[in-house]
Image (cartoon, rainbow, N blue to C red):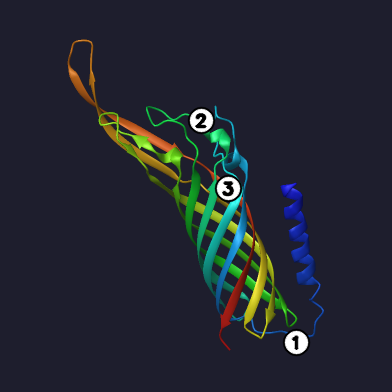
């Protein structure tokens, strides 16, 4: 069902955008300038991010959630430019996560949430077809800061449990169609794909006693990584600064 929803929205974007191509050139409005945008999205987890297999170390148990973003773009005279974006994403974990037990005395993985922060930059193409309708296509790379119970670690000596923030690289693409009114204000529908690989690496020192009664201090490495992937269906508003 999800893939048909995404396909329908993509076809709608193409139809609305290129259906305006026959408008006279004098009817077009300016694309260039500084664009500021704010919006929200319905975030649908895919792949291992939504996995529920408690025997797998890749399962994320993520449920559909939401995302909120703000971005700024510079668009040149040829409709190409560059943009930067901050996005907050939140996905709850389903009940299957409560059956997944962590190592040591940490206990079950769930209940909990995925809380993700993205900082991303990349190229952008924004072009009007006629006076009102435009398309907006973006590709971005950046960083993710992710919080989730899966990143909890336990000190083997003190048994203290730490809630850690994972970091990693992120990649995303977006395509949208918008409508401009009053020359500068716009509303837009958007579909996007986002993927990232946040992880942590922790080292604890553990004292072990061998068969002869000698004690040895041994490093204990803990490495945890997950893939966070989602389709995001959203809407936003923007304002263009410029001539």
In the figure, 102 relative to 80: above or below?
above
Tell which circle, 2 or 3, labels the residue nearer the N-terminal end. Answer: 2
Q: Residues within 10 Å of mark 2 (few under 14, many from 20)?
A: many
Whether the residues at callouts 1 and 2 have beta carbons within 8 Å, the answer is no
| Residue depicted at 68% across the width and 79% down the height | 180
| Residue depicted at 70% across the width and 77% down the height | 128
Task: Tell me, for residue 27, which label it has, or none.
Answer: 1
Task: Tell me, for residue 195, which label it has, or none.
Answer: none
Question: Whole-Å distance between the Cαs marked 3 and 1?
Answer: 40 Å
Indicate left or right for 204 with 140 as reference: left
Query: Badge 2 is on which residue?
Result: 100
Q: Residues within 10 Å of mark 3 (few under 14, many from 20)?
A: many
Of residue 207 and residue 136, the one placed in the foreground of this image is: 207
Task: Tell me, for residue 229, which label it has, or none.
Answer: 3
Question: Whole-Å distance between the Cαs marked 1 and 2?
Answer: 59 Å
> From this viewpoint, which residue is outermost toward the left?
214
């Amino acid at each position: 069902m999800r893939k048909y929803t995404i396909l329908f929205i993509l076809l709608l974007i193409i139809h609305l955008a290129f259906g305006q191509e026959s408008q006279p050139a004098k009817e077009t409005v300016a694309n260039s300038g500084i664009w500021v945008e704010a919006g929200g999205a319905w975030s649908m987890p895919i792949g291992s991010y939504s996995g529920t297999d408690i025997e797998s170390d890749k399962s994320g148990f993520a449920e559909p959630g939401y995302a909120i973003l703000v971005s700024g773009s510079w668009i040149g005279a040829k409709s190409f430019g560059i943009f930067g974006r901050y996005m907050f994403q939140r996905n709850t974990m389903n009940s299957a996560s409560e059956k997944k037990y962590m190592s040591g005395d940490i206990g079950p993985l769930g209940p909990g949430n995925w809380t993700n922060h993205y900082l991303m930059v990349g190229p952008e193409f924004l072009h009007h077809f006629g006076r009102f309708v435009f398309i907006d296509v973006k590709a971005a790379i950046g960083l993710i800061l992710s919080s989730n119970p899966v990143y909890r670690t336990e000190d083997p000596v003190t048994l203290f449990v730490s809630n850690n923030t994972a970091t990693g690289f992120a990649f995303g693409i977006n395509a949208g169609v918008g409508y401009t009114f009053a020359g500068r204000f716009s509303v837009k529908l958007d579909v996007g794909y986002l993927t990232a690989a946040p992880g942590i690496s922790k080292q604890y020192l553990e004292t072990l006693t061998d068969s002869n009664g000698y004690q040895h201090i041994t490093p204990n490495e803990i490495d945890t990584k997950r893939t966070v992937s989602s389709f995001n269906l959203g809407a936003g508003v923007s304002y263009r600064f410029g001539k």
